[in-house]
Amino acid sequence: MPPTTVKSPTIASGPVAVLGAIVGGVVGLLAPLPLALFLRHWLGLPEIDPTPAPKALTATYWLPWTLSWIAANLPGVILILWPPTRRVGRWYLIASISISTLIVWFYFGFEYKGFSPD
């Protein structure tokens, strides 16, 4: 009986990886802002005061952005759980997490630090 060959656990490449990375990048770029605005309205949170002033870090600031980040990255986690879609999910998450994290922190900084003149 010949010994079995074990394939190395390399990161997938090819059209599936490219598709996952493109979709994850687009979702990570375009989804967080509309989701955060929708969640702020849906949860009945007050509007943000745009003047730069010392503020307490309340749920008004962090909750919509945290939930929108989770919602943008959740499809990748779901894809990873099912073995046939694991490769596309891995690349979706790599692209989505890296881009959506930058987008969320960028807009969160504007909201928390203020973005209008005194």
Image: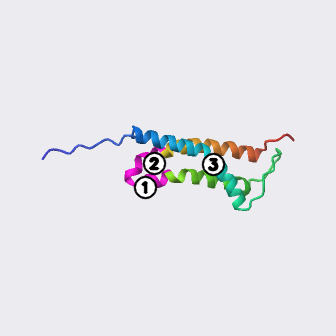
Give the labeled residue for mark 3. 32
Question: Residue visible at 43% across and 55% down?
Answer: 81
> Alpha-carbon distance for marks 2 and 3?
18 Å
- Is 103 left, or right, of 52 in this rendering? left
Res 2 visible:
yes
Give the labeled residue for mark 1. 81
CB-based contact (under 8 Å), mark 1 and mark 2? yes
Question: Residue visible at 66% across and 50% down?
Answer: 34
Res 58 visible:
no
Identify residue type, mark 3. Answer: Pro
**Residue closest to the eye, 14 or 108:** 14
Identify residue type, mark 1. Answer: Leu
> Alpha-carbon distance for marks 1 and 2?
9 Å
Judge depth for marks 3 and 1 and give the one in front.
Answer: 3
Q: Secondary structure at mark 2?
A: helix
Image spot of residue 31 (x, y percent): 61, 48
